[in-house]
Amino acid sequence: MKTVNGRFYFSLLIITLLLAVTGLGQLKAQDQVTLSNTSGNPIGLLIDGKLGGSFANDKTYVSPGSPALVGQFSSINGNKPNEIMAFTQDRPPAVFSHVPWTPGNDNIAVPFANKILIPVTIWIVYGDFNSASTKALNDVLTTSTIYGTERVGVDFSTVNIIDATTNPKAAKYYDYDYYTMAAGLKADIGYVPGQVNIYYVHAMNWSGILYTNSGEARQEGAPWIMLGSAAMNVVLAHEMGHLMALAHVHSGAPTQWFDYTNMMTTSGSPSSRFITEGQVLRMHLSSNSVLNTLYNARPGLLIRDCNPTSTKATDTCPGVQKRIWADGTYPAN
């Protein structure tokens, strides 16, 4: 009996050692992505390439830092991409196209760019200047916080606040009509070229109905934002999102992908503070984002116009709902 047990335990030991060696071999068979110029925060990756014999599209990885181990990729032929998209706080997303995956262990270097800093000018058209300018600064701080937390990699460099309440033509624009007042606004109140201009008025006039809690963003080659006097602090982040090519993603009842907690909801709530990685990519890569058209903040970098509302992933564009990290009650997907 002892001999049988001894042989059994000896055999079990051999099997365990073989499994351990096999496991070490599998662990060693890993490609890694080495990120430079990181912010010291966790890193999220979306990776395309051949994995396990088939095409992997937007394979998701989260790493506490650099390097990130990502399994064993190899290049895939044809029209399928070999690509890495990387995200972290206080940095714009990094995109490495045409990754030279090999059948062996690869170490792919991906650099993050520095945080993008943009200047804006704020015009206080209506109300007490001190109170309105304090609200404007709180709106800017809220936007900066949302963009920082949600890994947009964009912040404000300078915020110039101008008192337009003493302008004799200011009263004309207290209740701003989207359809009739756009042409005269810049000439009568003022406009600083080369940056987003933000105007604080009393209310937005939509077909004869005044909304003090509303906002509006316009492109037309000279981007600006209008905000009503009672607009929530999150509205500026929402309108800046429009100027960075984002579209509305939710209205009414919660859907499979979005509810009122997303920054680009039409419902509007103090809780509208989340942005998906699918949205962040569109903010940077879209040809009509002010980061590219106005600020030229990404010279020479990839432009890719992904459908602003599509939840269907393509080989080159994640769905707008793609999350590396959970957003509130919505899990990573």
Image (cartoon, grey):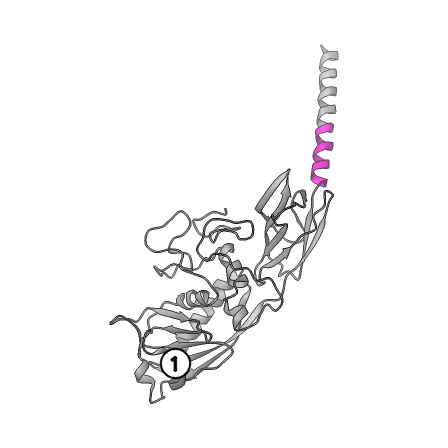
Quarter of the figure that contains the N terminus = top right
**Where does residue 35 sit, x and y in percent of width and height?**
66, 56
**Crowding near pointer 1: few (<14 within 10 Å), some, many (20+)?**
many
Say which residue label 1 marks.
124
Whether residue 15 is visible here, answered yes or no, is yes
27 inside magenta stretch: yes
Residue 100 to residue 205: above or below: above
Question: In the rendered view, does 1 fall on the left or right side of 172?
Answer: right
> Residue at the location (71% across, 17% down)?
8
Total marks placed: 1
Please provide percent x and percent y for residue 146. Answer: 47, 63
What residue span does the magenta drawing correspond to?
18-29
Front-most of residues 13 and 208: 208
Residue placed furthest toward the top: 1
* Above-or-below relation of 218 to 43: below
Mark 1 belongs to which amino acid?
Ile
Residue 127 on the magenta segment? no
Which residue sits at x=72%, y=32%? 22
Q: Nearer the viewer, residue 290 or 258?
A: 290
